Image (tube, rainbow, N blue to C red):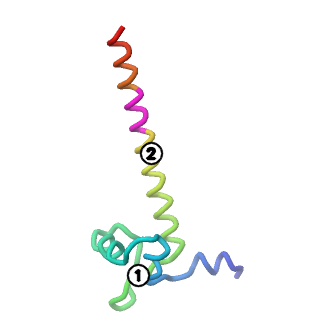
Amino acid sequence: MDRIETVKTRVLTVQEVSRYLRVHPSTIYRMLKKNQLPAFRVGSDWRFTVEAIDKWRAEAEQGALGKAEEEQMAEAQTHQADQQAAK
């Protein structure tokens, strides 16, 4: 198994994933409570795989980009309509 595969299958704790995402551990627990993060339990402890977190993050970024594009298009349409109304 090469190094990248080893890192991708690495299992993280709440503390490690909070450092990985650069957020406070309480943010991780809050997101877990709302089922917003891919995770699994080992006994009473939460665990995360780097691969699942990376996939979740990529999907979240795509959603954010999609919303930003929609907002830009709506703003452009509003601006265009305002320009036509001013004529």
Q: Amino acid at mark 1?
A: Val
The residue at the point 46 percent across, 47 percent down is 65
Give percent across and percent down for residue 30: 29, 72
Disc 2: which residue:
66
Q: Quadrant of residue 15?
A: bottom left
- Based on the picture, tell me whether residue 73 belongs to the magenta stretch: yes
Q: Quadrant of the C terminus?
A: top left
The tag earlier along the polypeptide, 2 or 1, is: 1
Q: Are marks 2 and 1 in contact (CB under 8 Å)?
A: no
- How would you classify the magenta stretch by its main secondary structure? helix
Q: Sort mark 2 into few (<14), some (14-19) or many (20+) by Cα contacts within 10 Å.
A: few
Question: Is label 2 or label 1 in front?
Answer: 1
Please tell me whether residue 60 is drawn above or below residue 75 in the rendered image: below
Question: Marks 2 and 1, Cα distance to the nearest angstrom?
Answer: 29 Å
Range shown magenta:
70-76
Eyeballing the image, is 21 above or below 65?
below
Q: Is residue 58 left or right of residue 86?
A: right
Q: For the residue labelled by badge 2, is the local secondary structure a helix, a strand or a loop?
A: helix
Q: Residue at x 49, y 71 (%)?
A: 52
Q: Residue at (56%, 81%) from the top-left corner?
A: 10
- Residue 14, labelled with which disc? 1
Query: Which of 21 and 1 lies nearest the eye of the viewer?
Result: 21
Report which quarter residue 43 is drawn in.
bottom left
Q: Residue type at mark 2?
A: Gly
Residue at horizontal 41%, vertical 38%? 70
Helix, strand or loop at disc 1? Answer: helix
